[in-house]
Amino acid sequence: MSLNIQTVSNSARQIATKLGITKFDLSGSTVDETSVQVDKGEQKQVKASNRAGITVRVWNQENTVGITSTTNIDDIGLELALKTAYEASFFGIKEHAPDFSPEATAPIAEVKLESGEAATVPQLIESLIAAERKLLDTHEAIESVPYNGLAQRSMSQFYLNSDGAIRSDSHSITSIYLYTKTEQEGKKPRMGGAAELSHSFAKLDIQKCIDEAAEKTISHLNYEKVASGKYTIVFSPDAFLSLLGAFSNLFNAQSILDNQSLSTPESLGTQIASPLLSVADDALHPSNIGIETFDGEGTPTRRIDLISKGTLASFIHSAGTAKRMNAKPTGHANMGSKITVSPHFYHVAGGEQVDDRYNLDTAENVILIDELQALHAGVQSLQGSFSLPFDGWVVNKGVKTSVESATVAGDFRELLNSIVHVEQKEEFTNGGICPRIWVEGLSVTGE
């Protein structure tokens, strides 16, 4: 579905003038998406969708705002949305009423947004069946690949307002995930998986996904129980970023203003983590497959330092939260019935020096956590506590033994301050860039 942003802008202005509306903005997107799943060499599911949506805000003469959304982006849909939002504006809030972002007309970064040629559905199915077959052939214990998918999405987004702001960008993403299940006599079923992202089907490294899923699965075949106790934990990049995301209210200005955060406005500039830890949110990082050059309010995105050598350096803002906290919007707003704020792409900086004490080839009795499970249930984000099952290994001088079943628990703020080493090598993951993180004294409960 193609969308001419200039045509939408011209139509919106003409309709607004006809309705007597002088102040409005629109934020919207179009998405084309196709996904397939297979089962034992046969096509299991094919999904395709083509959708569009626009959120419309209108201010009246009293400067209160009404908001509505529509999936009908022709002139009839635009007129109905503008009219409905205008009528709703008379019931809008007066305290902390939303306004245009002061940066809605500021220049956006000049970055190359990649879009690739879409594959056909038969190509997707054939490639996924071949990947499933290769994965099953890697080891006799791999009995099935019950969770799998190959998907491609092309997305365009735009923002415009009555003050002359008009901007758009577009990108495409292709992804694959493969999760295995094993069957061995006298042993519990084990699982392992991997996922890969790319801008296009042609550049998607399917073999890498197969190899990683096979390697992880095989490494979990010989498992042992782990004794409960306190351990030095090494978080994989994926595991650490998933935990950081679960407690993102630390940096979220909207959560702070709603008293739904572990931080307060006064937390800025205080030490919240080990000096070894530095974290940024970098929407424009070249490794970010889903780069967005502006947010739902038209504010340009940029790199924001969240934690600088253990110190809370910045919050992420919308235009409204920035105004209330005497800051600048940071490009993290999502337009909706309520403006929400969310991160883009984390970048945890690698350590500055090598420390021989923290080396998996020589360390004894440390636990390497590869993936955390059940974050939706095991995280108490307002208390800061977590208790999560995990996939991982006990590591003794480079020898990895899979953990049969265990949970790791603690307080996230204590965890941040218990970081004893940040490895130098940064690794790309689907959620950001991060090295392995060593944390001392976390509680592990075995089965």
Image (tube, rainbow, N blue to C red):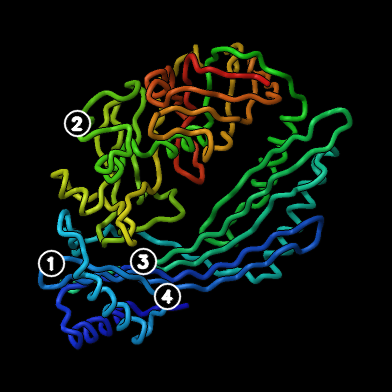
Judged left or right of residue 374, residue 185 is right
Q: Residue furthest left?
A: 62
Kind of residue at badge 4: Thr
Kind of residue at badge 3: Asp
Between tags 1 and 4, which lies in front? Answer: 1
Judged left or right of residue 221, residue 417 is left
Kind of residue at badge 1: Asn
Which residue bears the numbered disc 2? 266
Residue 182 visible to an observer of this rendering: yes
Q: Earlier in the sequence, mark 4 or mark 3?
A: 4
Which residue bears the numbered disc 1? 63
Crowding at dot 3, Cα within 10 Å, few <14 / some 14-19 / many 20+, comes out as some
Crowding at dot 2, Cα within 10 Å, few <14 / some 14-19 / many 20+, comes out as few
Which residue bears the numbered disc 3? 169
Between tags 2 and 3, which lies in front? Answer: 2
Image coordinates of residue 351 in percent, x first then y, are 40, 25
